[in-house]
Image (cartoon, coloured by chain):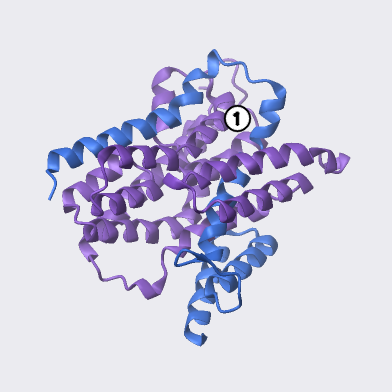
Amino acid sequence: MIPEGIPADEPGPAQEFLAGVRAELPLLLGVVPFGLIYGVLGLAAGIPPWAVIVMCFVLFAGSSQIVFAQLWATQAPVTVIGATVGVVNLRHALYSASVAPYLKALPLRWKLLLSYLLTDEAYAAAIGRFMGGPETRHRHWFLLGTGTILWAAWQLSAVAGVLLGTAVPPSWSLDFSLALTFTAIVVPSLRKRSDVAASLAAATTAILAQGMPHKLWIIAAAFVGIAVGGWTRSLDRKEQA
Amino acid sequence: MRSPWLLLATMTGCGLLTFLIRLSFISGGRHLALGPRFQALLRYVPLAVLSALIAPEILVRHGVLDPGPSNPRLWAGAAAVLVAYFSRNVLATIASGMLVLWLVQRIL
């Protein structure tokens, strides 16, 4: 039976969830090798195996987990580790702002759950559904789908990395798979001139600002890219706007 | 060797901080009226952040800028951009990028 007020052709929670899982699957090809590398690096940094795994639950943020492991290995002060992880993950505040309009009517438990799952890859696979897809009432299940499958894949690949130890030779360059994953998302989304300008500006800033402490270059490059995108909007052709 | 408790506490602190960063705008959605200009800028968030993460992976080697033809990641990145543009397929992009990277690493 269909509840009143919901169009019969509207996708239900399960359909949205599965569509999210499906959208995330190809990205896992880049995420799983990265999880393996994290597992291996974590052990190499002198972090006990249990903590390498636990970090996947409590932190659940790939690149900052690797940064954490590297800093822990150098005996960096705890405050420096916290500050660096915070700055590296500051970009997630931008994701939070980006999805907030689509989630504002949800109860708090949903907001807490989806915030926990809001990683680069879960966000990247779901934002197109929010920005371009139909405004149906179960669309937040799509983000739950991308986030859940990513979470599971991340935990399992990190466990595999811990078990394999140093069995993955660095010459395989598996770490590059993540940059390729992001490339696969960014390139098809460059539709307007201002998109290209924003992308090039962010990339250039990221290169020029590499020397900034605490990996501040990530957030600096993001802001420059967004600003340049906003400034160059007038260059977009009318029919694209 | 530092204590496992310090490790656990640091991890938990970093996890809580990360969670609060992600929750920031999502929790405030009801109180925070985002202006239309701000909303229009949000379009550039995924592009800008992901482009910023990609560029150093391709162009920076061992901490120095290396945009020359001896950099295998430049070839792999270029191949991935082309495949992504024409195929719009994530699997094909990652696979072709890794293949080109391994091939060029062998040759160079």
Q: Position of residue A208 (x, y in %)?
A: 59, 54
Residue at x-position 40% and y-position 73%: A172
Q: How many numbered badges does the structure rendering display? A: 1
Q: Residue furthest top?
A: B31
The vertical placement of A166 against B49, above or below, is below
Residue at x-position 36% and y-position 31%: B17
Disc 1: host chain: A
Question: Callout 1: few (<14), some (14-19), or many (20+) C-alpha neighbours within 10 Å?
Answer: some
Q: Position of residue A157 (x, y in %)?
A: 32, 56
Residue at x-position 64% and y-position 63%: B81
Q: Position of residue A79 (x, y in %)?
A: 29, 37
Let me know if residue A135 appears in the view: yes
**Chain assigned purple:** A
Residue at x-position 40% and y-position 37%: A86
Give the quadrant of residue B87.
Answer: bottom right
Q: Position of residue B1 (x, y in %)?
A: 12, 51
Amino acid marked by disc 1: Glu
Q: Looking at the image, which is closer to me, A186 or A14?
A: A186
Q: Looking at the image, which is closer to me, A116 or A81?
A: A81
The vertical placement of A19 against B101, above or below, is above
Q: Indicate the colour of chain B.
A: blue
Residue on which the image places disc 1:
A10
Q: Looking at the image, which is closer to me, B41 or B2?
A: B2
